[in-house]
Image: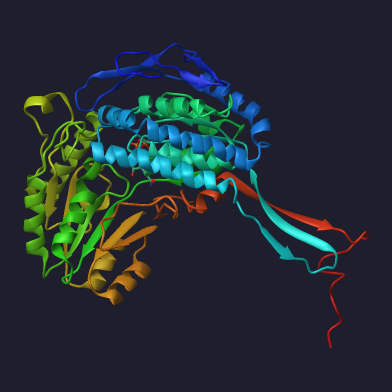
């Protein structure tokens, strides 16, 4: 079992622990303290090659293992996650930085997803339909595809691997998992628990390392049939290019610039709760974070006042402390980027109401902490209203009415999550219809997806696939249509069944 400290960890390939072929390593650092949590192999193409070969070999048997038996692995895994939840929460507050309640939610999401996908082991329905010919039977079945390359970000370090690995496994695929370089220890624990749950050797392999080397080699490998990727839009484009020559299946879950609409009839206290949770939860580092708040001018001033008061009352600190509201952001590059956007916002003419600075003093000195930041009088075309900042920064945009609110909400390149606070059922239904996003919330913030509905976005947030729910099965299976003719003679579709007309 892994422990924190300066322990050295390895890749897990074909059931064996292995260093990177190059012998190179990198460290995982706590964003709250800078403390090293472990040393990991900095892998390259050679390591990917070995992992893919192991996954390919394991596929021969795993694809033939009955789906309900594959599901049993996920039931056991869910149980182990539950037993280790406390340890994983503690580790997540240290390695990724989110606060305890959110870390608990992250682990619970993985438990829920594993249980949901285990249920698919006894469903995974296909179709039967009548043939146009006598004595002929037709059906469609889902077939596993082969080796899946899973590339994940650091912001949901247990949940996102589960969103990918649980459906891929129950559908009968084998996996090479390249986790984010900022959260390798949690990924390591994830794979250790899967192994403890009884995952056969080679079915799940983990290769640590950086995107441009290990990740790219995985995407380009000819024996990897499916790439499931969650990360930034820019990397998603690079992955698509790299996979194109081999016509691989590519599943992308990318960035967001999610907006909450607050109409004049909204319950303002509830709206402020929703905004605080969506804009500052996980320090704004959720793909579904509310980085825009689109407010009817009749309640704009009041909402602004209440939001600023709430932002200023948030307690900043390490995620593991009980009274922390806002943990650190992931690393130096993230805090530099967030702070650069504060300058961009002020240079563009937006009014900085609160925050806009690196939080320092006492225990904060050693980590990457940023004050919750609210900009007002933001024009919808400003960069802070268009680009993903991925930090605790939100932009208030003033609108005259519902139609303008919808136009502004849709006026971005992304289409992940959206929300409206209103008491008017007609407006709520119009928003559900007209907001261009994969997810719409009514009278709730932009986050809070459950595992049994599809998750993903329109426009530049992805490429049309969805994670979670039944939709995830489409990523990890291919349809086969099967025709069985039991007439004992050649029957020709579209020819032998044609009756003379008239
Ligand atoms: P990132 O794109 O920098 O990295 C994601 C992963 O891709 C990492 O494992 C990284 O090593 C790897 N990678 C980087 N370059 C690569 C390359 N050339 N080839 C192959 N792999 C490569 O993203 P991040 O900073 O880890 O995560 C934040 C981003 O993820 C944000 O944009 C956020 O919105 C997005 N995200 C989206 C969802 C969603 O479901 N839509 C969920 C969480 C996060």
Nearest the viewer among 490 and 198 is 198
Q: Position of residue 465 (x, y in %)?
A: 49, 51
Q: Quadrant of residue 30?
A: top left
Seen from this angle, which residue lies furthest top? 23
Q: Position of residue 62 (x, y in %)?
A: 64, 33
Most extreme residue toward the right, as rendered?
489
- Quadrant in the rendering for residue 259: bottom left
Q: Nearer the viewer, residue 339 or 3?
A: 3
Percent position (x, y) of residue 392? 19, 43
Q: Quadrant of ligand 1?
A: top left
Q: Indicate the colouring scheme.
A: rainbow
Q: How many dots with numbers? A: 0
Q: In which quadrant will I find the C terminus?
A: bottom right
Q: Is residue 415 left or right of residue 454?
A: left
Decide: is 264 above or below 145: below
Query: At 29% across and 75% down in the image, what residue appears?
Result: 425
Vertical position of residue 201 compared to residue 490: above or below: above
The residue at the point 32 percent across, 52 percent down is: 448
In the image, taking residue 3 as reference, residue 330 lies left or right, namely left
The percent position of residue 472, horizontal first and vertical second, equals 51, 49
| Front-most of residues 63 and 108 | 108
* Residue 235 visible in rendering: no
| Location of residue 397 with respect to 426 vertically, above or below | above
Residue at the location (16% across, 33% down)?
A: 369
User: Does residue 120 appear left or right of residue 63 in this picture?
Assistant: left
Please tell me which residue is depicted at 45% across the width and 20% down the height of the picture. Answer: 43
Quarter in which the N terminus is drawn: top left
Q: Residue 153 sits in which quadrant?
A: top left
Look at the image and tell me whether residue 95 can be seen. yes
């Amino acid at each position: 079992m892994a422990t924190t400290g300066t322990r050295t960890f390895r890749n897990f390939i074909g059931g064996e622990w292995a260093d990177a072929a190059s012998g190179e390593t990198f460290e995982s650092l706590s964003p709250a303290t800078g403390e090293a949590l472990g040393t990991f192999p900095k892998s390259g193409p050679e390591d990917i090659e070995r992992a893919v070969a192991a996954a390919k070999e394991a596929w021969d048997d795993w694809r033939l293992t009955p789906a309900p038996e594959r599901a049993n692995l996920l039931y056991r895994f869910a149980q182990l996650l539950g037993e280790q939840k406390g340890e994983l929460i503690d580790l997540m507050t240290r390695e990724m930085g989110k606060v305890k309640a959110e870390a608990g939610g992250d682990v619970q999401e993985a438990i829920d997803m594993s249980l949901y996908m285990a249920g698919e082991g006894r469903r995974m329905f296909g179709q039967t339909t009548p043939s146009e010919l006598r004595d002929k039977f037709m059906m469609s079945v889902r077939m596993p595809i082969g080796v899946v390359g899973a590339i994940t970000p650091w912001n949901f370090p247990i949940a996102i691997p589960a969103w990918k690995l649980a459906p891929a496994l129950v559908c009968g695929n084998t996996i090479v998992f390249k986790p984010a370089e900022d959260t390798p220890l949690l990924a390591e624990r994830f794979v250790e628990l899967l192994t403890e749950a009884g995952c056969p050797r080679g079915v799940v392999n983990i290769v640590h390392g950086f995107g441009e080397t290990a990740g790219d080699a995985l995407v380009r490998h000819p024996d990897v049939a499916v790439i499931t990727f969650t990360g930034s839009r820019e990397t998603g484009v690079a992955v698509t290019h790299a996979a194109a020559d081999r016509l691989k299946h590519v599943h992308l879950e990318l960035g967001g610039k999610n907006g909450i609409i607050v109409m004049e009839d909204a319950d303002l206290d509830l709206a402020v709760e929703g905004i605080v949770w969506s804009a500052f939860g996980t320090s704004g580092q959720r793909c579904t974070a509310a980085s825009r708040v689109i407010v009817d001018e009749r309640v704009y001033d009041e909402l602004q006042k209440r939001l600023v008061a709430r932002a200023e009352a948030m307690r900043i600190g390490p995620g593991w402390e009980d009274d922390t509201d806002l943990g650190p952001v992931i690393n130096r590059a993230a805090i530099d980027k967030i702070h650069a956007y504060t300058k961009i916002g002020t240079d563009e003419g937006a009014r900085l109401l609160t925050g806009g600075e690196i939080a320092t003093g006492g225990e904060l000195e050693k980590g990457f902490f940023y004050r919750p930041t609210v900009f007002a009088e933001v024009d919808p075309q400003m960069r802070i209203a268009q680009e993903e900042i991925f930090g605790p920064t939100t932009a208030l945009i003033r609108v005259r009415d519902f139609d303008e609110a919808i136009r502004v909400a849709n006026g971005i390149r992304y289409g992940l999550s959206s929300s409206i606070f209103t008491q008017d059922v007609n407006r709520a239904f119009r928003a559900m219809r007209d907001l261009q996003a994969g997810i719409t919330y009514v009278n709730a913030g932009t986050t809070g997806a459950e595992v049994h509905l599809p998750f993903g976005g329109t426009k530049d947030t992805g490429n049309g696939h969805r994670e979670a729910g039944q939709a995830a099965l489409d990523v990890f299976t291919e349809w086969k249509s099967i025709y069985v003719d039991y007439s004992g003679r050649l029957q020709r579709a579209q020819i032998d069944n044609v009756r003379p007309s008239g």
